[in-house]
Every structure is written in C-alpha cells, then in structure tokens.
Image (cartoon, rainbow, N blue to C red):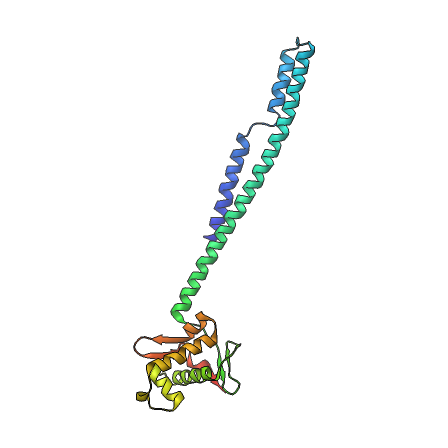
Amino acid sequence: MVVAGIASIVLILGIAAILLFMNLPDANAFNARVERIFVENSNLTSQAEVKLLEILAQSGTAFSETLTSYRFVIFVLLVFATALLVAAVAFLVMLIALNRRMSRIEQKGIEVNSLMIAREQNLVYLNNFEFKLTAAAIETLSVLAEARLDDEVMSGAEIEAVISGRDASDCEEAAGATRIKRLRDSLGNQMISELLVKNIARQGYMLAIDKSVIRMV
C-alpha cells in the first residue's frame, strides 16, 4: 500500500507536469509572430516602422527568456510538491506503524527478556538497561518480583506489610500505593513503569512479565 501510494503520487504529478508543459505556449511563439510580420510587410521601410519591429523582436526575446524561466520554476515546484507528498505519506505510514506497535505494547505489556535485581547495589537491570533505584524502591520491586514468582497479586496493604514486617490488617492500602508510585517515579520512564508494574482493579499490583526472566542477586 505504501509503495502503491507513493507510485500514485509520482504518476499523478508526472501526468500533471506533462499536460502542463504541453499546454504552455512555445517560448519562440512571439518571435515567430514578429518574424511573420517582417515577411508579410516587406514594404515597411520607414525608420519608425523598422524601429518598431526591432522593439517587437526584442520583446519577443525577453518573453522567450521569461517563459523559459517560468518553465524551470514550475518544474522545481512540481519536484518539491512530489517530495513533500512522498514525505507526508512516509510519515503517515510511520505514525500508523508506531500507533499499532504502541497498541500491541499496551495489550501485551512490556516484552522483558531479563529482569535482574541487585539489592545490595540498589540496581535493576531491565533488558540490559541499568536503573539506579532508592533502597525503598528496590524493596518494593523485590516484593513484587517474589510475588510474581509465586503467581500472586499483592494489595497495597500486603506490600506494606511485607516491607515493614507488620500484619497486613495493621497496614493501610495507601501506604503500599505510595510505595508503588515512588517505584514508578524511580524507574523514570512513565510508559515503562506503568506497563511493568500493573495495577489490577480491586486486586492489587503485579509485575506484568514472565516469571522465568526474573533473577535476584
């Protein structure tokens, strides 16, 4: 479809250019008419008449040069219009492809090939990208990773309970939600953080990745 669209643009503008140049007057038309006047009126011998014909001949030459420059300008504008339309089609296709890719990412989540958590160094390696997190963010991510290994979804109160060492009934949901927010802020990239740490309505939080890629050191 992309190739067909670009080919159609080039073909349409090419046909338009051919028709336009075919219908433009001949650059030498004016000179030919002046020459015809010279031939058909050989009895014009006065100085004023000859001068007038010379002026007409010079005007014809100026007209010819002007029309030639117009042809070049029209050609440049047609080339420029073709380039702009081709670029517009290319950018449109790129936007469509990007939107489709973003839709697939939103549906599937982030495709994570490896997630390694180094708790002592407060480092996270996500697809070989290194993230330096705070100790609290590392604790939150570690709890989520351990829960993902057990196929569990944790509420905010449960996350807070595991980290603080208290009973879940004594912890507030908002405290765990605050830890999740700080973890997402530490990860930085909003798209990555929102899709990596999923919020399941009325259940809790979980990592939206395959548990087989998780490593903790």
Relative to 20, 207 lies left or right: left
Q: Position of residue 82 (x, y in %)?
A: 53, 45
Q: Position of residue 116 (x, y in %)?
A: 49, 82
Q: Quadrant of residue 136?
A: bottom left
> Residue at left 65%, top 16%?
53
> Residue at left 67%, top 12%?
48
> Residue at left 42%, top 68%?
105
Relative to 75, 4 lies left or right: left
In the rendered view, would you say 33 is above or below 12?
Answer: above
Query: For this rendering, which residue is in front, 59 or 156?
Result: 156
Relative to 46, 25 lies left or right: left
In the rendered view, would you say 215 is above or below 57?
Answer: below
Query: For this rendering, which residue is in front, 69 or 160?
Result: 160
Q: Quadrant of residue 200?
A: bottom left
Q: Position of residue 2 (x, y in %)?
A: 47, 53
Q: Position of residue 196 (x, y in %)?
A: 42, 75
> Residue at left 46%, top 54%?
92
In the rendered view, would you say 35 is above or below 1?
Answer: above
Q: Quadrant of residue 68?
A: top right
In the rendered view, would you say 208 is above or below 4?
Answer: below
- Residue 119 in view (yes/no): yes
- The number of discs equals 0
